Image: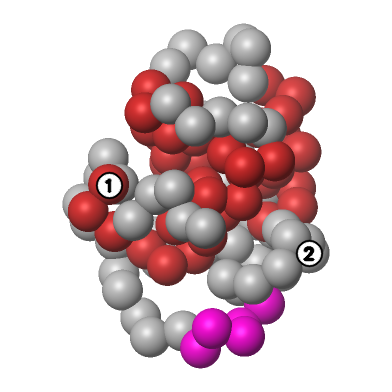
Amino acid sequence: MSLVIKNGLYYKDYKWTDIKEDDSRVKGLPDHTFFNRNEGYEMLYFINEFSEKHDLFDIPSIIKIERMIKEEVPSNIRSQENVAIWMESNWENSKI
C-alpha cells in the first residue's frame, strides 16, 4: 500500500517519466539500483518503502524523508540501498 501519492510530495519539481511497474527502480526492496532524486515515481517508491520499514507514518516524518533526500544526502551516494543506509545513520542528527 502506498502511503504517499504524487500530490503528497513536499517538492513539486519532479520529472514524471513513465516507468513500468516491474522496473527495479520502483519495485521490491531498495537495492543497488541507481536512485534518481529528481524522478517523481522513484521518490514515491523510496519514501513509501523507507517509511514502511521504519514505521514512519506521520506527515512530518514523510516530509522529513523527502527533504533529507533532496537537501542532506550527499550527491555521491547514488544507489537506493546506500541512500537508505545513510538516512538510517543520520536520521537523528538531521537538521530538518
SS assignment for the magenta stretch, majority:
loop
Question: Residue drawn at (54%, 83%), measured in percent from left and top?
Answer: 21
Is label 1 in a helix, a strand or a loop?
helix
In the displayed structure, 33 sits above or below 93; it is below
- Mark 2: which amino acid? His
| Type of colouring | secondary structure
Question: Residue drawn at (47%, 56%), measured in percent from left and top?
Answer: 2
The dot on residue 48 is none
Report the side of 51 relative to 57 (left or right).
right
Q: Which residues are magenta?
A: 20-24
Q: Nearer the viewer, residue 7 or 13?
A: 7
Q: Are marks 1 and 2 in contact (CB under 8 Å)?
A: no
Residue 38's spot in the image, x, y percent? 39, 60
In the displayed structure, 50 sits above or below 25; it is above
- Mark 1: which amino acid? Gly
In the displayed structure, 56 sits above or below 52; it is above
What whole-number distance in Å separates the C-alpha atoms at marks 1 and 2? 26 Å
Residue 49's spot in the image, x, y percent? 61, 51
Q: Nearer the viewer, residue 88 or 5?
A: 5
The magenta stretch spans residue 21:
yes
Report the side of 37 relative to 49 (left or right).
left
Q: Residues within 10 Å of mark 2 (few under 14, many from 20)?
A: some
Mark yes or no: residue 29 visible.
yes
Is label 2 in a helix, a strand or a loop?
loop
Please name the residue that numbered disc 1 is placed on. 8
Question: Residue drawn at (75%, 48%), measured in percent from left and top?
Answer: 82
Quadrant where the C terminus sits is top left
- Mark whose residue sits in front, 1 or 2: 1
Please name the residue that numbered disc 2 is placed on. 32
The magenta stretch spans residue 7:
no
